[in-house]
Amino acid sequence: QVHLQESGPGLVRSSQTLSLTCTVSGVSISSGGYFWSWIRQSPGKSLEWIGYIYYNGKTYYNPSLKSRVSISLDTSRSLFSLSLRSVTAADTAVYYCAREVTRSSAYFFDVWGQGSLVTVSS
Amino acid sequence: EIVLTQSPATLSLSPGERATLSCRASQDVSTLLAWYQQKPGQPPRLLIYDASIRAAGIPARFSGRGSGTDFTLTISSLEPEDFATYYCQQRLSYLTFGGGTKVDIK
């Protein structure tokens, strides 16, 4: 059974860097066919895709966040990480890691972490 | 950016009733659309992908249809556990989600 678990600080100071890790179990993170993603949800709001990393290290980011985001992969520890620089109160959200699957040209998120609430304080 | 507009924002229905949720894309996304259900304090759960294919373990009362710019998620007869918020998501150009439709108990 595939399991994803987010970890990281729940409180980040404004203008600092938000860093989260997603530990993956039950599947090899270096397998092709999966996009390892970060998605966030501000309180009471909808979902916003942040970006993803493919098994070969190639990354794709939401254009609205691209200048501040980095996603990296550590296959030896079976985890991938998010770094979001220069945060403001608008970055306060629940951050989810998720696995996106591609199947016969369709794409979908089939496994999600439980989410990690990150609050940006001034 | 492809914008997904979901309607209505809130749908108030009783158990046993039929729910029809709409998702409209700002441009043609073919069938690259998925639907998710989210309950408070939980991550989203995949219901439908490729516009009309039910995910593993999803009850047959959930169905999706559409292509291009207009999509519908139908719940044929609401069960108590179906009261939740539903999101559509496109994957043609980068990735975006709709604003959600909350299905609550009338």
Image: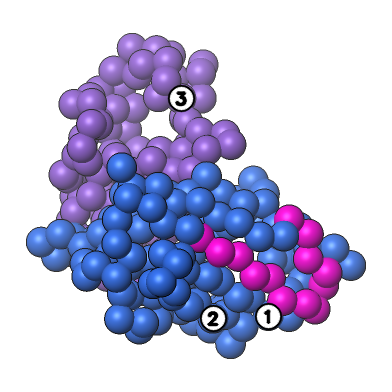
Chain colours: A blue, B purple
Q: Residue furthest bottom?
A: A67
What is the span of residues highlighted in magenta in the rendered image? A10-22
The local crowd at label 1, few if under 14, some if 14 to 19, many if 20 or more residues have their Cα within 10 Å, is some
Disc 3, SS: loop
**Placement of the C terminus of chain A among the 4 image quadrants:** bottom right
Disc 2, SS: strand
**Placement of the N terminus of chain A among the 4 image quadrants:** top left
* CA distance separating discs 2 and 3: 36 Å
**From this viewpoint, is residue A72 visible?**
yes
Of labels 1 and 3, the one closer to you: 1
Mark 1, residue position: A85
Of labels 2 and 3, the one closer to you: 2
Percent coordinates x, y for residue A102 in the rendering = 21, 62
Q: Is residue A16 magenta?
A: yes
The local crowd at label 2, few if under 14, some if 14 to 19, many if 20 or more residues have their Cα within 10 Å, is many
- The chain to which mark 2 is attached is A
Mark 3, residue position: B83
Residue at 56% across, 49% down: A115
Q: Is residue B11 magenta?
A: no
Mark 3 belongs to which amino acid?
Phe
Q: Is residue B59 left or right of residue A58?
A: left
Residue at 57% across, 80% down: A69
Mark 1 belongs to which amino acid?
Arg
Of B8 and A79, the residue lying toward us: A79
Mark 2, residue position: A70
- The chain to which mark 1 is attached is A
Please name the predominant secondary structure of the magenta segment in the image: strand
**From this viewpoint, is residue B27 visible?**
no
Q: Residue furthest left?
A: A104
